[in-house]
Amino acid sequence: MSLNVRSLTVGYGRSAVLSEFSLAVASGEFVVVAGPSGCGKSTLLRAIAGLIPFAGAISVDGVAVRGPSRDRALVFQDDGLLPWRTALRNVELPLALQGVPRSLRRSRAVEWLERVGLAGFEGYLPRELSGGMRQRVQLARTLAQQPSVVLMDEPFGALDAQTRSSMQELVTEVLAGTTTLFVTHDVDEAVLLGDRVVVLGAGEVERERDAILAAVKA
Amino acid sequence: MRWALRIGSVAVVLVLWQVLTATDTRMWLRFDQLPTVVEVAERFAVQVGGVEYYHDLGNSLARIMTGFLLAAVLGIAFGVLIARSPLLGDLLRPPLEVVRPIPAIALVPIAILLFPTDEQGIVFITFIAAFFPIMVSTRHAVRALPTIWEDAVRTMGASRWQVLFRVVLPGTLPGVFGGLSVGMGVAWICVISAEMISGQFGVGYRTWQAYTVVDYPGVIVGMVTIGLLGYLTSAAVELLGRRVTRWLPREALR
């Protein structure tokens, strides 16, 4: 379940959002990509997810990425849930797409919701849930999908401090051992969550607040 | 209290109508030519007691339902295809855009020439009338769909068809229902007009027929019937629309 990005370039010439970016994430590793807004963090994740065209090479376990697939799940900052589906049916969706029979996918989705602390909220629509709860549903959906790599795009950027810290705790717990690439502009979050921290434009830096700050500003 | 006010305002209009017509008032507008409320009510009671009335209702409803359902299916399909596929958009849009500004009712001569029976012609006119608002609303709704939902399901491994049925169609329903409501409205205008011109049965035909034989209460009965049918079918579309878009944020609902 290792992820390998070599000489990734998105866009052309001077308007390139990313150029010649390389990164290797070992199996089970949790890597945080930090950097200021607009530095290409989201673009990096979208390229790895296979949603946008790129130059260079991206591979998962040695298999080249050609387009989106269920082995690379993307967690969005907000609104990644389908608003017409209940929490339960959102979590069921990846299983439904894989053709898992209804009763089986239902019971699994219930379990995943329970795992993220949302037992009892199965029948709620996204608009009836708080921002933090919606992110929990997204997390449950991602877990249900059982991808090789989890890509998280500032998933807690829109949450208040308290909710964010409980979500960070949850993520460390449920994604332990899952190959994860986590994007954030929050230096403290990077230090807290990452096994390793990479700053876009500066490369890998020490997992330490001042080192990251210095790299981000450089 | 508000209901009392609403019912009261309708009652005032009816009383005014009765007074103006019963006293043969003529003040530039010639109310003496019109039947009174009582005459219309009596005529209504007679018609509702007869078979012909329901026969006409059934005919008009069958025509509008056939035309409207065809328009809904094809309007949604074409709207999605044009919005999602640049190739099909280039192929289908120009001819459709040429026909679109022509009011459907102006196609009556073509419909009479083209179709073996008047019945099919009327359904065709109704279909054309409802098709364009449905197609255009669907196209806009598909274009306005947030890409994040599609990205989300694609990274779950969804195929093109799964994206279409799991994201595009449900996500565009609010916009599509806007088009269906408008489509139902213009479909009624056109089915009634077409019946008046070339029908043999139906509420529109009967209303015009009543006029030509100087049965003015019958004309009003026809008009009221058309109004009721229009109201009921629009309400049905509205109700269905609200049921399937309950997920919308509350602010967007009326």
Image (cartoon, coloured by chain):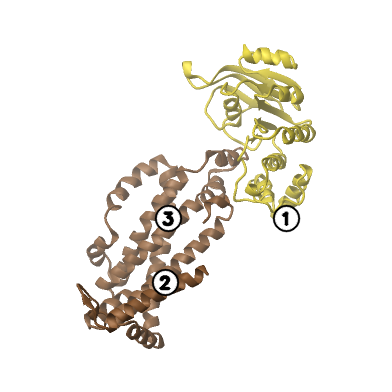
Chain colours: A yellow, B brown
Quadrant containing the C terminus of chain A is top right
Q: Secondary structure under badge 1?
A: helix
Dot label at residue B179: 3
Q: Report x, y in % for residue B251.
A: 55, 50
| Residue at 22 percent of width and 83 percent of height | B213
| Residue at 67 percent of width and 35 percent of height | A159
Q: Viewer-nearest of labels 2 and 3? A: 2
- Locate residue B114: give its quadrant: bottom left
Kindly report the distance in space between the C-alpha atoms of the residues bearing marks 2 and 3.
Answer: 31 Å
Q: Residues within 10 Å of mark 3 (few under 14, many from 20)?
A: many
User: Could you tell me which chain the residue with mark 3 belongs to?
Assistant: B
Q: Viewer-nearest of labels 2 and 1? A: 2
Q: Compared to A210, does B87 lie above or below?
A: below
Which badge, 2 or 3, is on the more N-terminal residue?
2
Q: Compared to A76, does B230 lie above or below?
A: below
Q: Report x, y in % for residue A76.
A: 63, 35
Do pointers 2 and 3 mark residues of a single chain?
yes
Residue on which the image places disc 1: A103
Residue on which the image places disc 2: B9
Q: Viewer-nearest of labels 3 and 1? A: 3
Q: Report x, y in % for residue B79.
A: 42, 50
Which amino acid lies under the numbered mark 2 shown in the image of this protein?
Ser
Which amino acid lies under the numbered mark 1 shown in the image of this protein?
Ser
Kindly report the distance in space between the C-alpha atoms of the residues bearing marks 3 and 1.
Answer: 36 Å
Asked whether the beta carbons under mark 2 and mark 3 sit within 8 Å of each other, the answer is no
Q: Nearer the viewer, residue B108 or B154?
A: B108
